[in-house]
Amino acid sequence: MMGADSLPRVTLERFRAGDAQAFAEVVRAYGPLVRGAVARYWRSAFEREEAMQEIWVHVYRGREALDPGRLETFSGWLAVLVRHRCLDLLRRPTEAAPASTTAEAAALAWLEAAPEQETSLEQAELRRAVEAFKVRLRPAWRDFFELHFVEGLDYGAVGERLGIGSIRCKYMRKVLAARARRNRALLAALGRTAATGGDRAS
C-alpha cells in the first residue's frame, strides 16, 4: 500500500511546479496505485496500458490543482483524480481527437465523407494521392484506415474486427490525421479540389 510519505515533500512541490524529473519520480512511486485503479475498469492489458498513458498525461496537466498545503494527502488526491479520469474515458468511448489545424480538418472531412464519383481531374488526382498515402501504411494501420475512414465503421465495430479497444482506435485516428497533415501531395490535392469546388459553387 502506498504511504502518504512515499515521496519527500520537496519532490511533490517540484512536480506541482512542472519539473520533469519529479514527475518521473511520481510515476515510479505511484505506478502501482494507478495500475491497480485501472485494472478495475479494463480487462485487456493493452487497454490498461493505453488508459494509464492518458491518465498520467491528465495527472500532469492537472498538477496545479494540487493544494500545496495538503501535500501529505497526495495519494488520496491522486486516487480521486485517477478514478474520475477512468470514468471519463469509459463515458466517452467514441470521442474523436480534435483537429488541430484547418489542413487536418480538411483531410479528416474528406476521409470521412462518402466516396464521390470521380467526375473531374482534381477528384481523380485526390483519389490517387489518398491511395498513395494508404499504400505506405503498415498492414494494421491500413486495415484501420479502410474500416474507419473508407467504410465508415465506428470504433466499436473497428475494435471487434481488429481486436483493439476504443482508446487504441482514437490514438490511431489521431496519428493518421497527423500523417495526412504532413503529406504534401495529399494536402495539395485537397487544396486544388477545394479551390475547384469553390469556383463551381460561385
Image (cartoon, grey):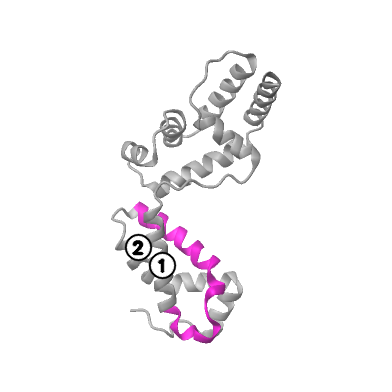
Left or right of 185 on screen, residue 86: left
Is residue 136 visible in this depiction of the protein?
no
Does the segment drawn in magenta span residue 58?
yes
For the point 46% across and 58% down, which residue is it?
54
Numbered badge on residue 38: 2
- Depth check, mark 1 against mark 2: the one in front is 1
In the rendered image, the vertical position of residue 97 relative to residue 123, given as above or below: below
Mark 2, secondary structure of its residue: helix
Query: In the image shown, does 173 or 136 lie closer to the viewer?
Result: 173
Of helix, strand and loop, which one carries label 1? helix
Is residue 5 rendered magenta in the image?
no
Q: Is the residue under label 2 in contact with that under label 1 (CB below 8 Å)? A: yes
Quickly name the residue at label 1.
Answer: 82
Coordinates of residue 98 in the picture (x, y in percent):
55, 47
**Residue drawn where x is 47% and y is 43% of the image:** 172
Whichever of callouts 1 and 2 sits on the residue coming sooner in the sequence is 2
Residues shaded magenta? 46-75
| Rendered position, 44 above or below 33 | above
Q: At which x and y percent is residue 155?
A: 39, 41
Q: Which amino acid does label 1 sit on?
A: Val
Quarter of the image for residue 103 reads top right
Report the side of 163 relative to 68 (left or right).
Answer: left
